Amino acid sequence: MYKSHLKTLSLAILCSTLFTGCGGGGGGPKGPSIDLSNNNNTPSQNTGSTASNNNNTTTGTVNNNGGNTSTNPPITDDHSRYARRGRVIDGYVQGATVWLDLNNNAVKDENEPSVISTDKGSYELELTEEQAQCAAYVPTYVDVPVGAIDEDLGEVTKAYQMVLPPTLTSLEGEDQQHITPLTTVLWQSLYKTDVYKDKTCTAILADNALQEQLKIVMRETIVQVIEHYNISEQQLFSDYIESGDEALQKLAEDIVKGLQASVEKYLKLAKEYVDAHEIRVLHYLDTPPEQPDSNELVWYRSILIYGKDGSTPVNQRVRMDDNLETVLFVQYDRKRITSPWSDNHTYIQSTDLVKNSADDIGHCFQSEKLEVKIDGITYELNNWKRIERTSQQQACDDKVDFSDTKNRVLSVSYSKDRVSYLTEFHQDANSIAELDDWLNMSGKSEILDVIVLVAYFSLAGYEFEDDVNIPFSSWHKRITDDSGDNRIITSRDSDGTWQRQTYQDDGTYVQECSTDGQTWTTCSD
């Protein structure tokens, strides 16, 4: 049941194309997004690290200005009525600091209530009526220090942080609020979105329209997370230890291992790239590319760093050892240059080094892409070529001549009435028959007319039901329909195969296959 969500394990931010700018491209899943725009490189200023005012990320020790004591108001019957209760779960964690981030700044301030988790990770965070009202709209953090006890794995040796996103609804007194690696993944998908960023409890309570926006974003992000792992919403917020869900517990343990390693690497990169605008670090498990049908999962690390000028000085994916301490080899390294092209269109040139194993000499993947946006439709023409390396030391040249390219991808995408459409045409040396002057496009904005490109697409047959009218080596068409209660994704390919993913109320999906788009059956493995 859980093979699908364990097969590809993303351990941090799941980039939302609707709400969060992902940046970069290729090289595996996207990682945690950490904003350094204020030039304050202490991780306590963001949710991408384990630091807070009460936590020392170097040693993981807890200060708390007086030891492991609660900073809650005196307990009264009223306070107990507004308490938030639940468990801190990786295994059950004792000795972790649970605190409510009233001003949503990812820092434990003196006026913010906190408590230490006890047996079976239990916590009871005493709140005033006002704080309880805020608890629905701001996150609850857990600082897990070195020395805390994981009841399954023993003493914690590397500090980390977990988060429970705001519920956006009032809680009943007996509701359990469990804080786990999976809820942390959900929050990391939310906190950089425009509607959540820097929003305090006071600001949210004063703005009903903002509250409704937050609910929409929360729902969309929950759908994305449970789709990614193909688990239900109930599992996402569950006590998987009590329920005996061993597959989900193993997933959570791997998430924590990746979170710890990502924090350590981020701290080093923040010192090295002091002028960076944003740093993303992600450790995750995936199938080795040289063994696509294998059930083996190995560790990778992805790093993406943005400069303040929009550049990406680092976009790299490496294979790690099982301890996440040693780089075994660089599997992917990208250099990318983006520049304006005529009337607000964009030209992008990418140079990628790609290797599948330590012994693989690898190859250089070179591409140039023109992105044209007209009347809500995005047209893309991408020329690419693969150059085999002759030695491990050979660099990938970023000064590329595309006049002899033998491969091209043409794509068109648009949305209408909550339905999104995408079509891709792949062409090779035998099928590139037109637009033969659309090569080395960087300096040709005065020569090439985008109307010619748009006209070519209009005759190509890019609508989902249309016959394809241009030469191709293959093509793919997809519809993502969000107009009903649940999402339905339908795709068809040039080989005559169809696929359909129908999402259920709990966020899981059923996958079916067809040869005509009319008769659907369960897909065979």
Image (cartoon, helix red, strand yellow):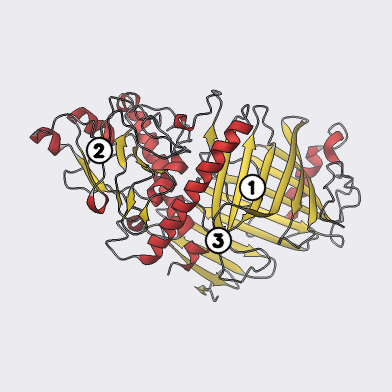
Report which quarter residue 268 is drawn in: top right
Residue type for callout 1: Ser
CA gap, disc 1 and disc 3: 15 Å
- Which is more foreground, mark 2 or mark 1? 2
245 displayed left or right of 403 = left
Q: Position of residue 46 (x, y in %)?
A: 46, 32
| Residue in the foreground of this view, choosing between 61 and 125 | 61
- Which is more foreground, mark 2 or mark 3? 2
The residue sitting at 51% across, 72% down in the picture is 520
Mark number for residue 490?
Answer: 3
The quadrant in which the N terminus is found is: bottom left
CA gap, disc 2 and disc 3: 48 Å
Residue type for callout 2: Val
Question: Which residue is under mark 1?
Answer: 413
The 10 Å Cα crowd at callout 3, few under 14, some 14 to 19, many 20 or more, is: many
362 displayed left or right of 390 = left
Whichever of labels 1 and 3 marks the residue nearer the N terminus, that label is 1
Residue 462 in sight from this viewpoint: no
| Residue in the foreground of this view, choosing between 262 and 2 | 262
**Secondary structure of the residue carrying numbered label 1:** strand
**Secondary structure of the residue carrying numbered label 3:** strand
Question: Which residue is under mark 2?
Answer: 115
CA gap, disc 2 and disc 1: 50 Å
